[in-house]
Amino acid sequence: MALIDRECVRQLLEAEDPDTALVFVRGECLVLTSGQIDDDHRPLIVARRRDLPESLSGDTVTGEQLDALANCLDNTARDLGE
């Protein structure tokens, strides 16, 4: 079962703030703005918007690209849990 899904990735890509982050908290994928991230969340950050390729923005992102990025971020989230 995947930890990070396509919808989380889409939300992160659509974020205007480059400091918006995908965070994995208690089994749930969350997209939080920089103002919502506190000291408890910082070690749980999987990726920030600014860390994602600029080519993956706008309406041109395909489902396959979302799935590939979700898979990559899923692996990162699993590494955080070790």
Image (cartoon, grey):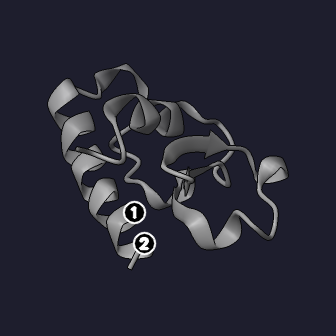
Count residues near mark 2 (Cα–Cα under 10 Å), then give few for <14, some for 14-19, many for 20+. few
Image-quadrant location for residue 68: top left
Percent x, y of residue 26: 56, 53
Q: Are marks 1 and 2 in contact (CB under 8 Å)?
A: yes
Q: Nearer the viewer, residue 62 or 28?
A: 28
Residue at which label 2 appears: 81
Q: Is residue 23 above or below residue 81?
A: above
Q: Is residue 2 above or below residue 42?
A: above
Image-quadrant location for residue 41: bottom right
Residue at which label 1 appears: 77
In the rendered image, which quarter contains the C terminus?
A: bottom left
Q: Nearer the viewer, residue 29 or 50?
A: 29
Q: The residue tagged with tag 2: helix, strand or loop?
A: loop
Badge nearest the viewer, 1 or 2: 2
Count residues near mark 1 (Cα–Cα under 10 Å), then give few for <14, some for 14-19, many for 20+. many
Q: Residue at x 32, y 32 (%)?
A: 6
Image position of 12 (left or right of 62): right
Q: Residue at x 21, y 37 (%)?
A: 67
Q: The residue tagged with tag 1: helix, strand or loop?
A: helix
Q: What's the residue type where badge 1 is placed?
A: Ala
Q: Residue at x 41, y 47 (%)?
A: 54
